[in-house]
Amino acid sequence: MAETPLADRRLAVIGCGNMATAIVGGLIEQRLLSPDQVVGHDRDAQRQAALVESRGITGADSNAAAIDDADIILLAVKPQNAEEVLAEIGPAVTDSQLIISILAGTKTALIESHCSGSVPVVRVMPNTPALVGCGAAALAPGRHAGEEHLALTRAIFDAVGISVELSEDDLNAVTGLSGSGPGYVFLFVEAMIQAGIDVGLSPRASHQLVAQTLLGSARLLLEDSAQRTPAELREAVTSPGGTTAAGLEVLRHEDFGGIVRMAIHAATERSRELGRGK
């Protein structure tokens, strides 16, 4: 394995759910880490076994055993379980270890309060497209995290997509937007596929056409962003009185934009509630 920012670093994964699986899978596929550098624990034995078997990492008998001798601790449990897990591992974490938390709504100050000393904490809001190397993550440092800790965190999340550094105050909004965003996109895709079937296409053809349309539109959005805004890209495919105009008129009439904004506001508020322990 080539020299990387994570060479010789050991990663402990606390919580082996979908997001942790996506991150670990991406790191291993991108060869930033080898399976023998990763140890994981989840109180759900089946989830832990699934990650161990699919990625060849080492399973631990407890959270405490997982973090022993780790350089980086990826905290990936449900936010509702944060206090319980932090009470278990917090006293054992040292200042030489880095905690990366992907817990929605859970502030770095809460994590720091469970640790003795000046443990560096970086809070990250990623999303599941990290599984295919197309994730979008926002990261915010805690009060003890320095540039070297941010560099390590960026190395992890840039390996599975892109990362941006923001204020921690912005992360609830990021959670509502890109963190939950794949769910909105997949719901829209489900509706498009079903609509294709309704107008006479086979399920397979409809699925293929919708998926490729989504991929192509995303690439246009990313690669043409310096020249054209999303509104200009939309206008470029909308001829007056044409088919796209007819479809867009229905979406506008049903307040599609307003519905999307309401969904993001609701997810953002839920992230704030999780941070308040609700």
Image (cartoon, grey):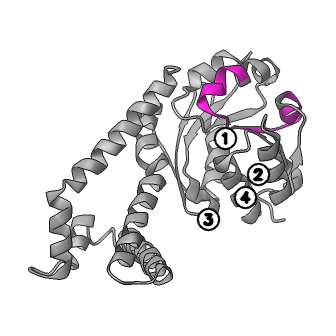
Mark closer to the chain start, 1 or 4 = 4
Query: Quick one: SS at disc 2?
Result: loop
Amino acid carrying mark 3 in the image: Val
The nearer-to-camera label among 1 and 4 is 4
Label 4 sits on what residue type?
Gly
Nearer the observer, disc 2 or disc 1?
2
Q: Which mark is residue 48?
A: none
Name the residue tied to disc 2. 6
Which residue shows up at 65% across the image and 52% down it?
155
Q: Which residues are magenta?
A: 64-84
Asked whether the viewer can see residue 34, the reply is: no
Task: Please say if the residues under marks 2 and 3 sit with CB atoms less than 8 Å apart.
Answer: no
In the picture of the structure, the residue carrying the numbered disc 4 is: 25
Residue 265 x/y as whole percent: 33, 38
- Tell me the distance, in whole angstroms, between the alpha carbons under discs 4 and 2: 15 Å
Judging depth in this view, the residue of 153 and 129 nearest the camera is 129
Q: Quadrant of residue 247?
A: bottom left
Cβ atoms at labels 1 and 4 below 8 Å apart? no
Given contact means CB atoms under 8 Å apart, are the residues at marks 4 and 2 in contact? no
The type of residue carrying mark 1 is Glu
Q: Secondary structure at mark 3?
A: helix
Residue 132 — which label?
3
Would you say residue 75 sits in the magenta stretch? yes
Cα gap from disc 4 to disc 3, whole angstroms: 9 Å
Relative to 179, residue 112 above or below:
above
**Residue located beneath label 1 in the image:** 148
Which corner quadrant holds the N terminus?
A: bottom right
